[in-house]
Each structure stands twice: as structure tokens, then as C-alpha cells.
Image (cartoon, rainbow, N blue to C red):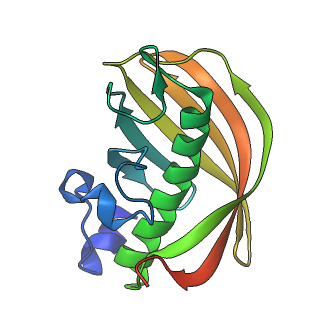
Amino acid sequence: MVQLLQFLGMTTSFENIDIHTLLPQQKPFVMVDRLVHYDKTRTVTELDVRADNIFVDNGAFSPSGITENIAQTCAARMGYINQYIYKENVKLGFIGSIKDLKIYSTPKVGETITTSIEILEEVFQLTLVKAKVMAGETTIAEAEMKIAISDIDSKA
């Protein structure tokens, strides 16, 4: 995959990508800081939990924030595909459903969470993912999420 991306002239250095260019969401509602991995079946992002995050309450990142982080990891994946593979604008996406959401703990301010999504199925503009959110070596959340992608440009 890396060789194919290099052949096509696409970047493989994720640290050079401004996450804001991949997401329809903008400050203060951005719940991922970095795209750290993308391939056909798996995408990984990181978020540094900061005190000024709108989902931080009493020094901890809320379950709602974790859920939004999973959705935005899906959005970062589609933003990467749209921009770097299809050479199109980022499209709006919507959560279709959330299944088996388990929040085991909430990360504290100062921690970095790593969220990975695995593609279980893609049909037309619907994507089903299995997500895992980690704080260090500890799994703090898991879920399945269905995302619907529209044809609407997010910057329209």
C-alpha cells in the first residue's frame, strides 16, 4: 500500500497532515488531533485530552466526547480518502447507529487517547466499523458504529 501511495505521489507522512483539513468539524468541536495510521481496513487517530475541551468535565473526558472521538476518527478516514486518494473535497457524514458501546473508564486531562477503527463492512455510502479507544495500554471504550457519508461538501 505504501509503495502504491508513493507511486501515485501521495503522502505517507501522516504527521504533516493538518487534521482540520480532513474533518468537517471545526474548533471547538474537533475531537481528534492527529491521524497516525490509514490503510484499507484500519485507521488510527490520537487526541490529547486538554482542560479546554468542551467534553471535559471535572478533569475527565466524558463518554459523549469518547463517542464523538470515534465518529471523528471515521470522519478523518473518509477525509483522508476524499482528499488524498480521490482528490475531492471532504464530505459530510452522519452517525447512523451505535451498537454495543462500552465505556470502561474516562481519560483524564493530560492523557492521550488512541482510537482505532476497523472496517467491518462498506456498502454504497454506509460504513460499519468496530472501534477501540485506548489510554496507554488500557482499553477505555469499544463500540460498533455505522456511518453514512453524504455527497455534500463539508466546506460548501
Q: Quadrant of residue 11?
A: bottom left
State the image quarter where residue 99 is shown: top right
Q: How many marks?
A: 0
Taking depth in this image into account, of 26 and 10 the one nearest to the observer is 26
Residue 89 location (% of width, % of height)? 41, 82
Using the rendered view, name the quadrant where residue 50 is placed: top left
Quarter holding the N terminus is: bottom left
Q: Residue at x 71, y 37 (%)?
A: 143
Reply above or below: 15 against 133: below
Residue 18 in the image, given as x and y percentages of width and height: 24, 59
Vertically, is 18 above or below 34?
below
- Up-down: is 75 above or below 60? below
- The quarter of the rendered structure image containing the C terminus is bottom left
The percent position of residue 17, horizontal first and vertical second, equals 24, 59
Judge left or right: residue 11 versus residue 135.
Answer: left
Q: Residue furthest left?
A: 16
Q: Would you place residue 54 above or below residue 32 in this image?
A: above
Left or right of 126, for residue 100: right
Q: Is residue 128 left or right of residue 78?
A: right
Residue drawn 50% across the image and 25% down it: 134
Work out whether residue 40 or residue 74 is closer to the camera in this orientation and state it.
Answer: 74
Residue at (61, 48) in percent of width and height: 118
The residue at 51%/52% (across/down) is: 72
